[in-house]
């Protein structure tokens, strides 16, 4: 891997991680067309996701601070934050089960461009259905245990490259009648334990990386962090304007294009 490739892939990851277009699918396709690119397992991809996880930490640092300190507080908002912390923990359980069970299978799919392209089109269908059949949000509709488990299960299936993690988790909550802003916030926060866990599982691959490449990996993660901050802000604006359908069209078009290219 070259420094230029690391920077380009970091920018791609950060720009697409929080948009419902599957950053993992974009990385898999881009890496397939980059001459001389290689990585041990999916270590580089995981470190790029770590960069965008830090972007979530920065963007929502007040929320995260309140969640982590809630067990030790007794103010009027502490109970609400403790409940949210429990819901995030519950939602992380199905994600962890699916992720651990399907890690090897999903890793092998990163080089199968027809599958990645097909999953992009599946993402488009999911986004379309969430816009077409989303329940009108109600002020009293809040995220409960059922919503957390559904969202966590959906996030688990996003281990398949081409399935958008942001897209499938937000869509699952929209279809349950959760407000778009609330759904996006919960999706972002739920991503953190999953990405942290994936990072820990991939640390063993670091010994296969040369000293020079470690610098490239770090640069890629840094670029992903910076562009990820911009991407979060952009997605929240999109959710407010109910424009997910346009991303469905994009996923269908991109998936069809790369599926055709890979088969011809």
Image: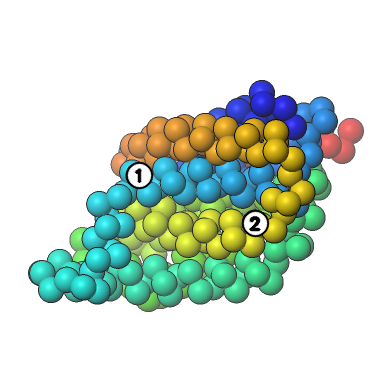
Rendered residue at 13%/73% (across/down): 74
In the rendered image, the residue lying farthest to the front is 211
- Which tag is nearer the camera, tag 2 or tag 1? 2
Rendered residue at 63%/66% (across/down): 99
Rendered residue at 35%/74% (across/down): 86
- Residue placed under numbered mark 2 in the picture: 203
Q: Is residue 2 above or below residue 151?
A: above
Q: Which of marks 1 and 2 precedes in the sequence?
A: 1
10 Å neighbourhood of mark 2: few (<14), some, or many (≥20)? few
Q: Percent from the top left, x then y, of residue 216? A: 64, 33
Res. 141 in view: no
Q: Percent from the top left, x then y, of residue 142? A: 28, 66
Image quadrant for the N terminus?
top right
Q: Percent from the top left, x then y, of residue 78? A: 18, 69
In the rendered image, the residue lying farthest to the right is 264
- Residue placed under numbered mark 1 in the picture: 58
Residue 148, picture quadrant: bottom left
Q: Nearer the viewer, residue 197 or 144?
A: 197
Res. 2 in view: yes
Rendered residue at 65%/39% (across/down): 214
Disc 2 to disc 1, C-alpha distance: 23 Å
Decide if residue 98 is on the left or right side of residue 62.
right
Q: Percent from the top left, x then y, of residue 164? A: 57, 49
């Amino acid at each position: 891997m070259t420094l230029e490739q690391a920077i380009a892939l970091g920018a791609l990851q950060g720009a697409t991680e929080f948009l419902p277009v599957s950053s993992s699918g974009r990385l898999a396709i881009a890496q397939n067309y980059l001459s001389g690119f290689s990585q041990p397992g999916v270590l580089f991809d995981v470190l790029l996701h770590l960069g965008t996880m830090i972007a979530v930490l920065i963007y929502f640092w007040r929320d995260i601070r309140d969640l982590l300190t809630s067990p030790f507080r007794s103010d009027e908002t502490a109970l609400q934050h403790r409940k949210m912390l429990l819901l995030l923990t519950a939602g992380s359980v199905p994600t962890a089960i699916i992720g651990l069970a399907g890690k090897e299978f999903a890793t092998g799919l990163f080089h199968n461009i027809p599958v990645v392209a097909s999953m992009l089109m599946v993402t488009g269908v999911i986004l379309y259905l969430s816009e077409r059949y989303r329940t009108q949000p109600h002020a009293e509709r809040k995220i409960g245990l059922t919503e957390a488990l559904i969202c966590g299960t959906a996030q688990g299936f996003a281990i398949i490259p081409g399935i958008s993690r942001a897209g499938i988790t937000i869509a699952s909550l929209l279809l349950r009648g959760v407000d778009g802003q609330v759904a996006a916030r919960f999706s972002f926060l739920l991503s953190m334990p999953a990405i942290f866990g994936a990072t820990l599982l991939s640390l063993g691959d670091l010994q296969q990386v040369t000293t020079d490449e470690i610098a490239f990996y770090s640069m890629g993660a840094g670029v992903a962090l910076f562009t990820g901050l911009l991407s979060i802000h952009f997605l929240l604006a999109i959710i407010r304007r109910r424009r997910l359908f346009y991303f469905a069209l994009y996923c269908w078009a991109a998936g069809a294009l790369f599926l055709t290219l890979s088969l011809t």
